[in-house]
Amino acid sequence: MDYALGAAFFYAWSVTCARRSSAHHGPDLANLGRLLVAIVIVGLFVAFSGRHPFSAGWGWLLLGGVLGLGVGDIALFHALPRIGVGLTMLLTQCLAAPIALFLEYEILGLSPNGPQLLSALVILAGVGVALGAPAEGDPADRRTGVWLGVLSAFGQACGAVGTPMAVDACARAGETIPDGFAQGFVRLLGGVPIVLLFVLWTARKDGLLAKLRRPYAWRTAPIWMFMNGLAGPALGVACYQWALTKHDAALVLSVVALTPLIGLLMQWAVEGQRPSWRLWLGGAIAILGVVLLRRL
C-alpha cells in the first residue's frame, strides 16, 4: 500500500496549500487553477515520456475524473468554509471507503476478506477519533456543508471504482492498463471541464476575478496554487491511480483516509496549530490499522 500512503501524503500537503490558495483566489478559482496546473504538468510529462494514456478502459477513467475531480472536488471546496477542514476531510475520506466497498460489491462482485476489512475499520476509527471535533463555520451552513461532504465522498468513491472497471476493460481487450501518470491525465481530462463550467456559471454575475483578495499577493499566491496543483491532482492522483491498479478501491480509500490526520500534522508544522490529545490517540489507532493492512 506504499502508493496509497504516498497519495495520502500528497493529498494532505495539497489541503494545506489549498487553504492558502483559497484565501488568495476564492474556492472556485483556487480549485480550477490547481487542476489547470496539474493537467499541464502531467500532460507534458506523459507526452515527453512517450506514455499512451488512451487504453481500452479510458472511458471509465474519464468518468472517474468527472465524478471524482469534477463533482467531488467542487463539493469539497464548498464544504470547507461551511464545516471546516477537519469535518470536511473526515466525511470525504472516511465515507468514501464504505461507499466504494458497497459499489464494488454491487458492480464488480468484489469483497475484501475479514482481516482486511477489520484493518480498514481500525484506520477509519482512528481518523474518526482524531477529527471528532465540532464543525467550524456558520451554524446555519452546517447541514449544507455536511451534505456537500457526503457528496464529495460519493464522488471520490465513484472515481475510485472507475479504475478497476478500466483494468477489467483493458484485460478483456488484451491490453495493459497505463501507469498512474497516464491514468491521472485521463482523469484530469474528465474533471477540468466540469470545474471550468461550474466556475463560469458561478461567475456569470460578479465576474471571474471577483473573489481575488486585493491587493493580490503576486509573490506568494501563485506559488500556493502551483504547489496545490503539483501535490494533489498531479503527484497525489498518480500515486492514487497506481494504488487502485494493485488493490481494491475500498482498501485504498481506507489508507487514503489518513489524509486529514497527516494534514493536521502538517498544519502544526507549517502554521503552528498544535494538535489535541484526540489527534495523538487517533493517530496511534490509525497507524496501527495501516501496519496491519500492510501485513495482510
Image: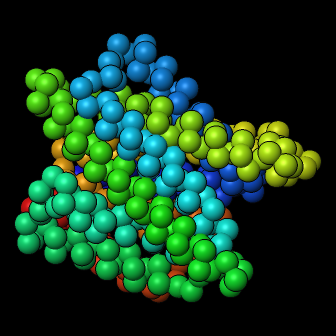
Image location of residue 154, percent across then percent down: 40, 61
Q: Residue at the location (60% across, 74% down)? A: 144
Image location of residue 91, percent across then percent down: 45, 71
Q: Is residue 39 left or right of residue 1?
A: right
Q: Can residue 133 be seen in the rendering of this structure?
A: yes
Image location of residue 39, percent across then percent down: 52, 30
Q: Can residue 184 be seen in the rendering of this structure?
A: no
Q: Residue at the location (16% across, 38% down)? A: 168
Q: Residue at the location (35% across, 53% down)? A: 158
The structure's colour scheme is rainbow
Q: Quadrant of the C terminus?
A: bottom left
Q: How many marks?
A: 0
Q: Is residue 256 left or right of residue 18?
A: left
Q: Which residue occupies the foreground of this view, 31 or 296? A: 31
Q: Residue at the location (48% across, 46% down)? A: 69
Q: Is residue 29 left or right of residue 212?
A: left
Image location of residue 237, percent across then percent down: 41, 42
Q: Which residue occupies the foreground of this view, 126 or 25? A: 25
Q: Is residue 227 above or below residue 41?
A: below
Q: Is residue 249 above or below residue 184?
A: below
